[in-house]
Amino acid sequence: MSRHLDYLYIVATIGFTVYGQLILKWRISQLGSLPVDFHGKLKFLILLLLDPGIFSGFAAAFLASLAWMAAMTKFELSHAYPFMSLNFVLVLLLSGWLLSEPLTLQRSLGVCLIIFGTVIAARG
């Protein structure tokens, strides 16, 4: 049973990564476009860094890194890394649902191929 629990490190890595990507996109889209002038860009980027949502995205990336390092103590890289492709799947699906981004036929087929490839790689 403990081997199954080791997979929680990979799941945590995926969860934190997906959260980070979604929260960054959500907050940035609410805060507007990057200004054209240099001082406007600098001010905008500093405001982004001070935003609690953006900060939580950075914190999630840090926690994902810690979870990934823990996963690396339990699995060979060639076994664990294919699971990272699930980030693409989850971000695509959740960005369609939560951020109202389009989920096209091509993207859906791509997600199916990623899932199929992940299953094959994980069994190998």
Image: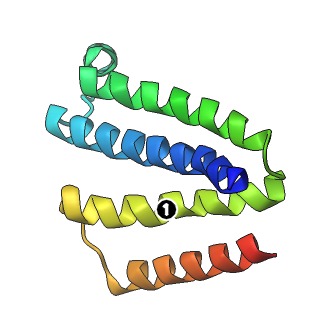
Residue 124 occupies quadrant: bottom right
**Is 75 rendered above or below residue 33?**
below
Which residue is pictured at 43% across the width and 48% down the height? 18
Front one among 67 and 22? 67
What crowding class fits label 1: few (fewer than 14 Cα within 10 Å), some (14-19), or many (20 or more)?
Answer: some
**Is 10 rendered above or below residue 106?**
above
Front one among 53 and 76? 76
Which residue is pictured at 33% across the width and 46% down the height? 22
Front one among 82 and 92? 82
Q: How is the image coloured?
A: rainbow
**Is 40 rendered above or below residue 81?**
above
Residue 92 occupies quadrant: bottom left
Residue 20 occupies quadrant: top left
Residue that extends furthest to the front in the rendered view of this protein: 1
Which residue is pictured at 79% across the width and 50% down the height? 75
Residue 12 lies, in percent from the top left, at: 52, 44
Instruction: Please state which amino acid type lies under the numbered disc 1.
Output: Phe
Residue 29 lies, in percent from the top left, at: 21, 41
Whether residue 8 sits left or right of residue 22 in the image: it is: right
**Is 65 rendered above or below residue 91?**
above
Front one among 18 and 70? 70
Q: Secondary structure at mark 1?
A: helix
Which residue is pictured at 32% across the width and 14% down the height? 46
Total marks placed? 1
Q: What is the quadrant of the N terminus in the image?
A: bottom right
Query: Residue under circle 1?
Result: 88
Residue 19 lies, in percent from the top left, at: 38, 43
Residue 116 lies, in percent from the top left, at: 60, 82
